[in-house]
Image (tube, rainbow, N blue to C red):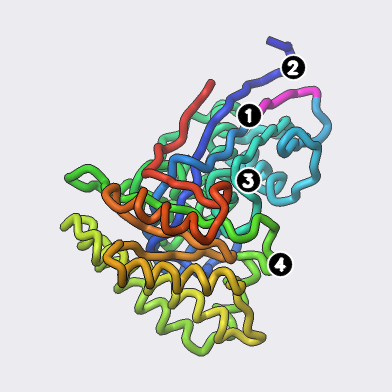
């Protein structure tokens, strides 16, 4: 090993999609959510990040998909890490991302989960998954959930120590698939952070959202415990639409939907009427995710292929938690 290298690590982390969503922060600096959330970690989209701390570096060097970039969010995150570790060395960060960035496909969830795990190990901190979850939250709220596989709950907490994610237990095999319909791979015009802040500050319905989201979370946990796919799907779908109603009621109003988003929503409803049980959810972007079970996944895919290219449809199964490559 190079004498200047203090430590290095490489981690793969997978994206998660929230079934009960958080939308809005009660503390911007610590990224503490206004309400708890439940997500599903997926097995297809992931970020792979290598971090090398080197005492000879004069500043952090960040590479994204093999290109050198300037990224203040990552540097700010690394400064938080250095402060916690009491170590002022700089590092090289190399990230390869299989997720379209900032397109509503949860690229930040896998990105900061991988960065938190790799950077903390490389700098010499031996953190538990719970501690990595707390650290990942400082980069991106949704990243706190990508530390774990399957169904995960983010406990909102009130401070830096008690806001973290934990895996949800379920007795039976998780018969839950998610088909991603990629309608637009471009970066969204309105960031999630701005969208949340605007909704919290200007939507007259925001307090009602908090109350309803907490109720959705309680009902979702009951549906998971009972292995009740129908209730799980209905809660997922209505929770997503309630979240997006906040953007429409903000001042100025905005939406992440496009024309194809609305067509896909109606298509999912048509499939249900045809006896193919499935439900949609949509994050901060136009792309639609469709929840279904094993028995219907291939049938639904055949119907979708009448409307979309095969390259724009991705079947996801429940995915794993973070994986240390070294």
Q: Which residue is pictured at 52% across the width and 80% down the height? A: 246
Q: Distance between the residues labelled 4 and 1?
A: 29 Å
| Label 4 vs label 1, nearer the camera | 4
Label located before the other in sequence (2 or 3): 2
Could you say which is closer to the camera, residue 92 or residue 56? 92
**Residue 192 left/right relative to 88:** left
- Per the image, label 3 sits on a secondary structure element best described as helix
| Label 2 vs label 1, nearer the camera | 1
Relative to 31, say whether 238 is above or below: below
Label located before the other in sequence (4 or 1): 1
Disc 4: which residue:
189
Return the x and y of residue 76 as percentages of the image width and height.
69, 48
- Write down the quadrant of residue 18 in the picture: bottom left
Return the x and y of residue 229 as percentages of the image width and height.
24, 59
Return the x and y of residue 183 as percentages of the image width and height.
59, 60
Quadrant location, the N terminus: top right
Disc 1: which residue:
50
Q: How far apart are marks 2 and 3 (CA)?
A: 22 Å
Disc 3: which residue:
80
């Amino acid at each position: 090993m190079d004498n200047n290298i203090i430590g290095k690590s490489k981690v793969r982390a997978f994206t998660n999609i929230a079934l009960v969503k958080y939308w809005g922060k009660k503390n911007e600096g610590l990224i503490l959510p206004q309400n708890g959330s439940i997500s599903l970690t997926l097995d297809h989209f992931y970020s792979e990040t290598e971090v090398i701390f080197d005492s000879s570096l004069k500043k952090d060097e960040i590479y994204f998909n093999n290109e050198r970039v300037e990224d203040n969010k990552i540097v700010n995150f690394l400064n938080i890490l250095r402060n916690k570790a009491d170590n002022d060395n700089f590092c090289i960060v190399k990230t390869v991302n299989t997720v379209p960035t900032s397109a509503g496909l949860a690229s930040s969830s896998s990105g900061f989960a991988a960065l938190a795990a790799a950077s903390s190990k490389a700098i010499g901190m031996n953190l538990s998954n719970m501690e990595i979850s707390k650290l990942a939250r400082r980069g991106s709220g949704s990243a706190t959930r990508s530390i774990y596989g399957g169904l995960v709950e983010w406990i909102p907490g009130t401070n830096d120590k008690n806001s973290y994610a934990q895996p949800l237990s379920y007795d039976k095999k998780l018969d839950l698939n998610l088909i991603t319909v990629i309608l637009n791979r471009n970066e969204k015009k309105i960031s999630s952070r701005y969208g949340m802040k605007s909704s919290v500050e200007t939507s007259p319905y925001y307090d009602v959202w908090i109350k309803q989201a907490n109720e959705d979370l309680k009902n979702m946990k009951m549906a998971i415990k009972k292995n009740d796919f129908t209730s799980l799907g209905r809660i997922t779908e209505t929770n997503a639409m309630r979240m997006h109603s906040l953007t429409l009621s903000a001042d100025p109003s905005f939406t992440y939907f496009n024309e194809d988003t609305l067509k896909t929503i109606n298509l999912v409803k048509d499939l249900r009427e045809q006896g193919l049980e499935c439900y949609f959810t949509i994050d901060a972007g136009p792309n639609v995710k469709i929840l279904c079970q094993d028995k219907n996944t291939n049938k639904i895919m055949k119907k979708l292929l009448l409307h979309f290219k095969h390259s724009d449809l991705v079947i996801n199964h429940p995915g794993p938690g973070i994986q240390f490559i070294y």
